[in-house]
Image (cartoon, grey):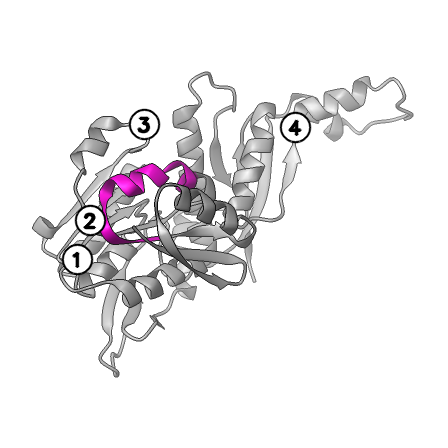
């Protein structure tokens, strides 16, 4: 398998926070290059050395960087999109600039090459009893009468290949009722809300903190011949943007949120605000180790009947209000 090096630029104060958030999206291994650590090493009075290579001396002036390696396939693309989304969220909240520039750059590979190379691995596949996911550049012979969802994730999370997305789609298929109104928070490519529409939802609203994700979701809805009057997209952070929160205010029959544990916990009261009594909440993007924490937080907001699905270290949970 081919791997791509991703360098995440931050500051010393951002290392612990970013590493924690990387673990929350399933990244278990990374290397850290930090000038402050090396300066501390040089100043250690108990140090014993006769020679330090010039390349190592350069570390005293380096920009703090966390390096991860992603597979050059569709899951790697989704993970990169998740990294960039969390960095954008951190940058928006870091008003004092404590965490550095918070940018991710690919080493030895042009963005255009990355954007196209992984597509060779993304082929049509089926999910649950009713859905088939088809990339926009592939043909699919629908021999068993499935609902075909055509998707082009662009730079947004959501091909359907990641376990978190698959788990959400299976729960949507199980619990969606014809005519439902659906709210997709952290929509990425729009795959969850578009699937809901194709499976019988009447209206959908898709929201993401990134403008390009909201635009991609709208484009993908068009690819699937969804009436734009019935599918609305917004971008921004509803936890801090009250104007946006008011704009999407309504009572929905189903809410989906495939994000990360910390954001799901922070949004628990927003889920209650937007979901009708008796409605269904589906959350995912949760590493198994944090599933209980997320469940308890959402239960504390008045939800009930948690139903957890696990797959290879990832969890999705359905609740009823």
Tag 3 and tag 2, C-beta contact below 8 Å: no
- The residue under label 3 is 240
Mark 4 surroundings: few (<14), some (14-19) or many (≥20) residues within 10 A:
many
Residue at image point 38% right, 58% down: 165
Q: CA distance from mark 4 to mark 1?
A: 50 Å
Residue at image point 48% right, 30% down: 102
Rendering coords of residue 242 (x, y %)? 24, 27
Q: Quadrant of residue 202?
A: bottom left
Depth check, front residue: 226 or 8: 226
Q: Earlier in the sequence, mark 3 or mark 2?
A: 3
Residue 77 seen in the figure: yes
Tag 1 and tag 2, C-beta contact below 8 Å: yes
Confirm whether the magenta stretch covers residue 91.
Answer: no
| SS at circle 1 | loop
Residue 107 seen in the figure: no
Q: Magenta segment, which residues?
A: 263-282
| SS at circle 3 | loop
Tag 1 and tag 3, C-beta contact below 8 Å: no
Left or right for 271, reference 201: right
Q: Earlier in the sequence, mark 1 or mark 2?
A: 1
Q: Earlier in the sequence, mark 1 or mark 3?
A: 1
Of badges 1 and 3, nearer the viewer stands 1
Rendering coords of residue 80 (x, y %)? 45, 46
- The residue under label 2 is 252
Of badges 4 and 3, nearer the viewer stands 3
Q: Quadrant of residue 163?
A: bottom left
Tag 4 and tag 2, C-beta contact below 8 Å: no
For residue 267, above or below residue 189 = above
- The residue under label 4 is 34
| SS at circle 4 | loop
Q: CA distance from mark 4 to mark 3?
A: 32 Å
Residue at image point 23% right, 60% down: 196
């Amino acid at each position: 398998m081919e791997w791509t090096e991703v360098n995440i630029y931050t500051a010393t104060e951002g290392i612990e926070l970013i590493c924690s958030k990387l673990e929350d999206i399933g990244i278990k291994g990374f290397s850290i290059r930090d000038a402050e650590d090396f300066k501390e090493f040089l100043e250690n009075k108990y140090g014993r050395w006769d020679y330090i290579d010039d390349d190592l001396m350069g570390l005293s002036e380096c920009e703090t960087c966390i390096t991860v390696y992603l597979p050059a396939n569709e899951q790697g693309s989704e993970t990169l999109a998740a990294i960039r989304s969390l960095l954008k969220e951190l940058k928006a909240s870091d008003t004092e600039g404590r965490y550095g520039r918070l940018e991710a750059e690919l080493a030895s590979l042009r963005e255009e090459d990355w954007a196209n190379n992984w597509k060779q691995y993304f082929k049509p596949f089926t999910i649950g009893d009713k859905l088939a996911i088809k990339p926009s550049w592939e043909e699919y012979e629908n021999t068993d009468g499935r609902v075909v969802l055509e998707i082009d994730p662009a730079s947004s999370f959501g091909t359907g290949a990641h376990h978190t997305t698959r788990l959400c789609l299976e729960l949507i298929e199980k619990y969606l009722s014809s005519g439902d109104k659906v709210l997709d928070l952290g929509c990425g490519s729009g795959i969850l809300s578009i699937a809901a529409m194709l499976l019988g939802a009447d209206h959908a609203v898709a929201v993401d903190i990134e403008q390009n994700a909201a635009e991609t979701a709208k484009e993908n809805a068009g690819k699937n011949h969804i009436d734009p009057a019935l599918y609305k997209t917004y971008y921004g952070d509803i936890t801090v943007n009250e104007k946006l929160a008011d704009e999407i205010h309504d009572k929905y029959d189903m809410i989906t949120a495939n994000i990360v544990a910390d954001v799901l916990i922070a949004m628990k009261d927003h889920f209650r605000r937007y979901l009708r009594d008796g409605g269904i909440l589906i959350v995912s993007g949760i590493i198994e180790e944090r599933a209980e924490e997320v469940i308890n937080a959402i239960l504390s907001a008045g939800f009930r009947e948690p139903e957890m699905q696990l797959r290879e270290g990832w969890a999705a949970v359905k609740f009823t209000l």
